[in-house]
Image (spheres, rainbow, N blue to C red):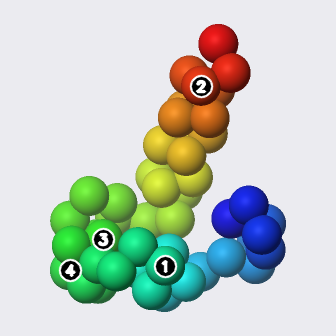
Amino acid sequence: MYVKGVSLTTLDDVRAASGTSKSQLYRHYPDKDALVRDVVALQAADVL
């Protein structure tokens, strides 16, 4: 997401970069919006 931006990053990109299986990713994030929310929350927590 940092390199390609949110709109161009797919869940398959995230899966490949993180080394997780599709089932593992979808177990924690049912859709891309849920993943983006957690990424934003993590980045915000680091800033604060």
Q: Residues within 10 Å of mark 3 (few under 14, many from 20)?
A: some
Residue situated in front as seen by the camera: 36 or 19: 19
Cα distance between the residues tagged 4 and 1: 15 Å
The residues tagged by marks 1 and 3 sit, at their Cα atoms, a distance apart of 12 Å
- Residue 31 x %, y %: 43, 66
Earlier residue among tags 2 and 1:
1
- Upstream in sequence: badge 2 or badge 4: 4
Residue 21 picture location, percent across and down: 25, 84
In the displayed structure image, the side of residue 29 where residue 36 appears, left or right: right
Q: Residue at x 67, y 76 (%)?
A: 9
Residue 31 horizontal side relative to residue 7, left or right = left
Q: CA distance from mark 2 to mark 1?
A: 21 Å
Q: Residue at x 56, y 22 (%)?
A: 45
Residue tagged 4: 23
Q: Is residue 5 above or below residue 13?
A: above
Name the residue carrying label 2: 46
